[in-house]
Structures are given as structure tokens and as C-alpha cells.
Amino acid sequence: MAQGALPGFRDFYPEQFAERAHVTNVWRDVARRFAFAEYDGPPLEPLELYTKKSGDEIVGQLYNFTDKGGRDIALRPEMTPTLARMAAAKAAALRKPIRWFSMPQLFRYERQQRGRLREHFQLNVDIIGEADVTADAELLAVAIEVMRGCGLSAHDVRARVSDRRLLHAILAELGVVEERHPTVFGVVDKIHRQPRDVSREKLTAAGMRDDAIDDFMGLTKEATLDQLDQRFGGAAAVKASIDEMRRYFACLEGLGVLEWVTIDLSIVRGLAYYTGIVFELFDAKGELRAICGGGRYDTLLASLGGVDLPALGFGMGDVVLTELLRERGLLPSAAPHPQVWVAAEAPSQQSDVRRAATALRRIGVSVEYALRDQPLMKQVRSAKAAGAEWVLTLHLPGRPEAPPEPHSWKPDAPPDWNRAITEIGL
Amino acid sequence: MAQGALPGFRDFYPEQFAERAHVTNVWRDVARRFAFAEYDGPPLEPLELYTKKSGDEIVGQLYNFTDKGGRDIALRPEMTPTLARMAAAKAAALRKPIRWFSMPQLFRYERQQRGRLREHFQLNVDIIGEADVTADAELLAVAIEVMRGCGLSAHDVRARVSDRRLLHAILAELGVVEERHPTVFGVVDKIHRQPRDVSREKLTAAGMRDDAIDDFMGLTKEATLDQLDQRFGGAAAVKASIDEMRRYFACLEGLGVLEWVTIDLSIVRGLAYYTGIVFELFDAKGELRAICGGGRYDTLLASLGGVDLPALGFGMGDVVLTELLRERGLLPSAAPHPQVWVAAEAPSQQSDVRRAATALRRIGVSVEYALRDQPLMKQVRSAKAAGAEWVLTLHLPGRPEAPPEPHSWKPDAPPDWNRAITEIGL
């Protein structure tokens, strides 16, 4: 028998599942507090759902195949196309703005690299139907509140935000014609990952003068709204975009997450469909890949043939986040264990053991007991091996050395647990 | 754009997701109370993992394909092979008995029938490493406690149990040679679904005499342990099996679920690998397919090339159970909704709205507010449309008609919520 999972796939033994559940529980709890509703779609979708958005090149990265009915289908590599499909199908009936989240497992057939996964779980949070930056702030607050919910602080994680409209306006001021903006965006996207010379060369090729390049590359290192306002505020388009960003930051302040946020014009998000504010979350030390990325994609839903509604969202995978939490000692330390182990002095008490276990389980306590007759000492050892927090011992009545009470707890259990046991006459 | 999911796949809009979550929450809670630990495996596995257990015929029912690395793989149609693989890989290190559960989505490419699904979610609960009937009782109690956790009673659902060893022993007594037992099991499996004449014919072909057939068909309609003991108790193998069943029932009584259970010798579970006690749960009216089925499969793990450990388990799908709960009015009536809607009298209070929302969200309350400036009346209407349970209104100070308090709740909110708002000065 094959002893392992397929390359790139994870087995979640209880220890690993507990880690995954820890993360997904925080995701779900924060989304609920922000009044987002959970949805899910099928893990299999028609292949065209993905090629329509990302072109045929995407197929090389997919788990795609032809099913027995002759349909070209794929395991979902991302959730947005499913979201677009579902929202479009019921757009008229849904209350706007739509506030939805999902936690799908996603699949990519990437060329196998050492330790590179072909699946991960991803929190997807989206708002559909609100064009104002108030929605952008609400969305980023969800992502940051997840960090806080995981026990991380603004010293551990930074949210870097930019606005594609602002970048467009600045480029126009720097004399870059609109047709060249995509090229410049491509350079910006890699500006911290490729040599400065290469970036300069490409910007020159995009038609930027040397002094504009100096200017621009300085901005992608560090910039405040005040600096941008001072430098470019004379241009109406830049000014309008800066004013939007100021409102955005005021909202973030009201939402209590401003201290996590930095402006970073080098954030453009590789994919082409973003239209406004974009953001990524990183560990503050900069050692890991992005924890989360998202932004506004006002034209995507319509271009997918769905509803023409402004929209924004982010995706946050489980892998980088879990890595960061492990590094910071913020993951649960062990698999779940029973709260109570019920033990007995004699095999004749097996029925009482089950009655006691049942009484406790029915008030919500997690209970285990030995399925096979064992001496008391062995039962206590089993309890310890299982990591049980309490041991309830049923004593054999009538023995000369019998304790005064028919049962005892180690350590002392909550009163309602003891009451449940006393009530069934033990 | 394709407006729907692939045939046989479900979209879970928030309303449907809430139903699914209701069921999976009960599954998880009951499994936790019985001290089972959650695990998961990949939704894709090597094809041979399934053909090894079920033969090549299974391929016709699978979503299988060749991946880009040339591997024959399949979307998991069941969880047991993954469980066997995972348990085998760490058998030596795992505490026995292994008590694990999982809630995978499973896939079958069945010929499309009206309304027939190609995916479902299934609770899998298994115990590995305990041969005694005490484990069989513990397992059935989990399944029944799930019914109770869903709000169902012993009047709604019946657990029908049998024991393959008992059936083997009875057939031997009725003169059926061992080679013919599989044929008879096949007849028994369909005995309530095919005409009596067809069953009789097949039993005759299996070598049973007419009077034995009468005898046997009576037993598959109704039988108590006492009746079986009286009729066949003289045979040592039957007697041993009956004694085991008596111990099993005593355990079920201790676990508080005996009233749900009936002996039914017609339960054999189609699949060939069961070796001992088997069971199914049905709605008492008999209108739906089985809610759940399982039993003991002591030789399966070894035959899959894994560990040689006794094992038992059951699978419970979400579809039939949800259907039953809907019929009985036991499903949540609506999608989740915010607990609190924060409203304000004037646009100038937008920052306070966000501060109030944040204060409440951080103490665990689900909060929404209008992302766009709206008159108070419209905000209250939005709150109602969202199904918010409470509305918190921030009043504009200084107006002649301003209320005495800077904020008010409708209806009166829990004191700690109000404290959270007062503490931030609102």
C-alpha cells in the first residue's frame, strides 16, 4: 500500500488537524464578527470558468481533466470565479452589499518543488456592491483582525497598501503614456526582487526619463500621503486619489487598525484585474511570503459575464500564516484530548463506567474510558497517555478499605460535572 | 458565463451553508464528546488505493484521471482507504485504540439521475485496535447520539443491527455450506427490495431446503435474541455469537441508547469486507434511504497491505440526514445575520459608528453598519433587511430635541455590550 499522500498533498493527523482547525476557527470567528456570511461552491468547476478570467495559460497550472461525460473540468485553483458565478446567478435577489466569506481548499498543479504544496486552504472575504473606500477599509480591517485574533500584533505583521488609481495618476504626471502603464506596473511588482539596474532599464524602455525614474524609484521605497500631496498634489487626478486615501485611512482609524498599515506604492498585486486600493500583509521581519493579498476589482464581475457591480476581496492562505504562528509559538501545542477519563476499581463496574461517561458526555464533556477490562492502575496510566485532564474513579462499595464516597475526582472537577454523576446514583 | 455548478454538484449559498454547518457542527460536537480526534486526508489519492480495496469495477464510478506527472489518481469516493493508509504509516506510534473521525467531501461519478448528487459530505467515525464488542457499542452510541444532537428521538430513527458471525452460524445450522454464504448474504441484502419469489429462488439455488428457507425468511423479518437462542442456541457457534450480542446490548444500555436499537438480520451491508456486528440507521417511517451504515471490518486493514489491527467504523452522509431534519422542522430557518446594526443620526458620526462597531466586534459580537452615508430611517431599514437583532443608534449631541443619552439600543442590549460602548465614550 502507498504509505504517503500524493506529492504536494498533506495528511492531517490529529496534531496537524488541530493546527489547521485553530487557524480556520479564527478565520470563521472574525468573519462572523464582521457580519460576513459563509458560502461554498464545488471543488470541481468547468474549465472555462478559469480560462475566461486568466486566459489559456492558466491551464498549465491546473488539475484539469475531461470527465466521463466529456466535460472539461478543473479542480478549483481560486475562489473568485465561483463567487462571481454564484453572485451573478442570484444578483437580483441578494441584499447589497453582499458580504460573503469562504474557506475553500484550492489546487494548483505547480511543477513539483521541494516542499511546495499543490493544495492549500484559503480564507476568501469579499464585498460586492459598494464602490466607496469605506468598503476597502472594512475589508482590510477583517484581514488585520484575523492577525490580532491569532495573537499577532502590529509589531509582527504589517499591512502595506497602495492604490492603482494613485499610481496611474502619478505615472501620468511623470510623463508615462497610458499604454506603458502595464509595463511599469510589471516592473513595480518586482521592484524589490530584481536588481535596480534591471528595473531602471525596463522603466527607460517604458519611456521614462532618468530623473523621473529616480523620482519614481524613491517613491516605491517610502512615501507618505503628505509627501505625495506636496510633490504631485497640483495634479487633479493625484489630488483626488490622495483625498480618497485620506478617507480610507480615517476609516481604518475608526476601525482600530491604523497602526498596522503603511503606504507602499510597490504593492500592485501581480494579477491584472485590480482597479483601486490593493494591499498585502507581511510578517514584519520580511522573512516569509505574503500572508494575504487583495484589493478592489470593480470591473472583473462584469468582464466574467456576470453582474456589473463594484467588488473587492482578499485571499489568505493557511500555509504562510501557520508557519508564522508556529515560529511565534502561537499554535496549539497538541492534538485534542479527552477532558475526563472514567475509571473503575472492578470489571463488575463496567456498566457504571458507561453510565458515568454518558451522563458527562450529555452535558458536553469530552469523555473516554477503557474499552477493555483493566486493573485500575492501568486505566489511570491510559488516562495519562490520552492526556485526560481529569480522572473520575468509581469505587467498589463494601470493601473494608472502600473510600467514604462512591466516586472521586482527580483533580477536583467542576461542580456541575460532579452533580451529573451524583444524579445517576454514582 | 456558466450560471450553475456542474451537474450533481451543490452551490452552498449562505442559507444552504447554514444548513450544512448545522449538521457538521453536531457531527463535530458529538465526536468531540466521545473523545474522537479529527483528521483529514487529501481529496485526491492514487487510483490504486481504491482498486486495491474494491477491484477494478470501482473505476467506473470514480472521478479518476491521469495527472500531468502521469499518475493515475482519483477524487476520493470514500474515506476508509485513506484512513487505512494514514493509520498504517504511523501505526507503531499511535495510541490504541485509535479513535478518529473525519468529515470529508466524497465524490462519485454516478450516471446522472434526476437530483442524484455526485458529491456529499460524510461523517466517518472509526475505532482501530479493539476487537471487543465494547467498541462496537461505543461506535453505535456515537451515531445515535448524533441523531439526538440533531433533535431526533427513538421515535424518529431506528438503529438496526446484526452480526455477520451470527448469520454465518445460523446458515451453517440451516445446512448452507460456507461457499454459498456470500450468495445468501447477497439475497439477504436485497430481501426487502426484491420480490419474495426471487429471493426464494436464489436461496434454493444456494442449496437451502424449502423449510430452511421458510425458517430463514421469517428470521429476517423479525427476531429477538431470546428467539434465536431458543431456536439455534444448541449450536456452539450460534450460542457464542448470541452471548456476544447480549454483552453488546448491555453496553448499549449503559450508554443510554438501547431504546433506539432493534435486531434485524436482514442488515448485512452490501460491501464484502465486514466481519462482525453491522448496523444501519433509518428514519422510523422508512421513507428515506439509510441515514448511516457501518460495522466491524477486522481483516480489511491487513488486506489493504497496512496494519493487522481489528477495526470498525461508520459513514453518515449529509444528504439523507438533512432531508430528514428539514422534514421534521429541525433545520435552522435562515442564514446567519448580524447581531447588532450600528446606526447614526448624522454623516459626521461615521467615525463613531466604526469605533462602536469595533468595540462590539472585539468582545465577540457580530456587527454591521451602513458603508455609505444614509439617513437614519434608511439605516434602520437596512438593519431590518439584514435581520439584525439589535440596533444601536448614536445620537447627535447638541440638537434641541437630542435624547438625554448619547446612544440608545433597540431592544435593550446585554449590559456588557452597553458597557463596551460607554467605555469608548459614546
Image: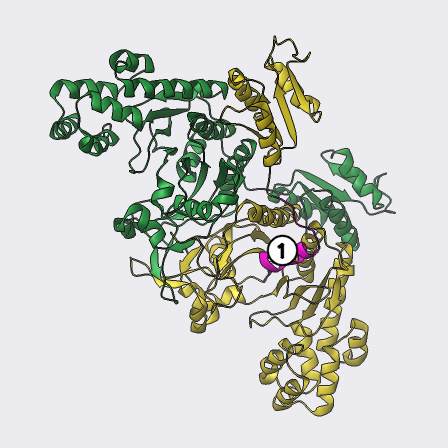
Chain colours: A yellow, B green
> Which subunit holds the residue at mark 1?
A
Tell me where residue B190 appears, x and y as whole percent.
23, 31
Q: Quadrant of residue A49?
A: bottom left
Element type where label 1 sits in the image: helix
Q: Is residue A38 above or below residue A229?
A: above
Q: Is residue A313 above or below residue A53?
A: above
Q: Is residue A320 magenta?
A: yes
Number of marks drawn: 1
- Name the one closer to the observer, B396 or B115: B115
Name the one closer to the observer, A64 or A56.
A64
Above or below residue A208? Residue A5 is: above
In the rendered structure, the answer to whether residue A170 lies left or right of residue B159 reads right
Residue A412 is left or right of residue B99, and the answer is right
The answer to whether residue B344 is visible is: no
Residue assigned mark 1: A322
The C terminus of chain A, quarter of image? top right
Q: Nearer the viewer, residue B250 or A385?
A: A385
Q: Foreground: B52 or B239? A: B239
Residue A424, quarter of picture:
top right
Does the segment drawn in magenta span residue B227? Answer: no
- Residue B3, given in percent of the width and then of the height, sits at 42, 57
Residue B34 visible in the shown view: yes
B34 horizontally vs A33: left or right: left
Q: Position of residue B183 (x, y in %)?
A: 19, 33
Q: What residue do we see at 31% from left, 17% from top?
A: B239
Image side of residue B192 versus residue B31, left or right:
left
- Over which residues does the magenta segment extend? A311-334
How would you rate the neighbour count of disc 1 (Cα within 10 Å): few for under 14, some for 14-19, many for 20 or more? some
Q: Position of residue B335 (x, y in %)?
A: 55, 42
Q: Could you tell me the amino acid type at mark 1?
A: Thr
